[in-house]
Image: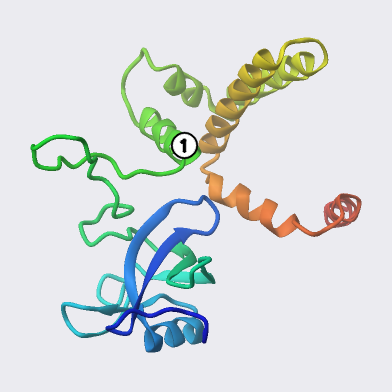
Amino acid sequence: MSNLKFDDQGLIVAIAQDHLTGEVRMVAWMSREALDQTLETGYATFFSRSRGRLWVKGESSGHRLRVHSVTADCDGDTLLLGVSAEGPSCHTGAQNCFFNPVVRSTEPLAAGSPVAPLLTLLEQTIEARGQSTSEKSYTKALLDGGPTRVGGKIREEAGELADALVAESDERVAAEAADLLFHLLVGLRARSVGLSQVIEVLRGRMGVSGHVEKAQRTRVGD
């Protein structure tokens, strides 16, 4: 902490980013005391410049940020918090605080949808299509068919990707991989399994030999 550069008010910028999906949830300020408390409790504590005091994120709303890591940038004047969010992170109720597109115009900022990594946005779109009533939605038709129908499409798309890997162009490989990934996300939605759950499993396997991990899975299954 001695290498961190706090400003003349004793504060440093802290960016909260989902530690699994990479989604930027919010930006706030930390004092040394706020940082100490964050590291001690494992939950994000910031310094409110307007109120002149520490505040624990979610102390009134319950929407806390569980902090898994704190990393400083190369200059030591900005912190990146790897977090898991317990509910929306913006005081407006939005999932994150970034939803005002900035353009070269004199018009006021117009609120849009919160930005997020592409796969997170795709997951949200699939969920929205599943709740629609449109008979023209391919995604809705797949979800209405349940895991059996979606599973069939995943097998089909996986086969097409396997064939493309052997004998087709890079462009076809990318296209077939995109098809498989889309149907995989639809399948996860059909089972109400979130993408973050899958990433969490992958994170847990990092640093573990694939042979060892597979052997452990076999023993558990037995």
Mark 1 element type:
helix
**Numbered marks: total:** 1
Badge 1: residue crowd in 10 Å (few <14, some 14–19, many ≥20): few
Residue depicted at x 87% and y 55%: 209
Residue 87's x, y, as percent?
A: 36, 60
Residue 39's x, y, as percent?
A: 50, 82
Up/down of 176 relative to 126, above or below = above
Res 200 quadrant in image: bottom right
Res 171 quadrant in image: top right
Q: Which residue is mark 1?
A: 118
Res 78 quadrant in image: bottom left
Residue 130's x, y, as percent?
A: 40, 30
Residue 141's x, y, as percent?
A: 45, 19
Residue depicted at x 42% and y 23%: 140
**The residue under label 1 is which amino acid type?**
Leu
Up/down of 112 relative to 67, above or below = above
* Image-based side of 104 in relation to 29, left or right: left
Up/down of 83 relative to 42, above or below = above
Up/down of 180 relative to 127, above or below = above
Residue depicted at x 52% and y 46%: 194
* Image-based side of 3 in relation to 87, left or right: right
Residue depicted at x 32% and y 73%: 29
Here the colouring is: rainbow
Name the one closer to the observer, 9 or 121. 9
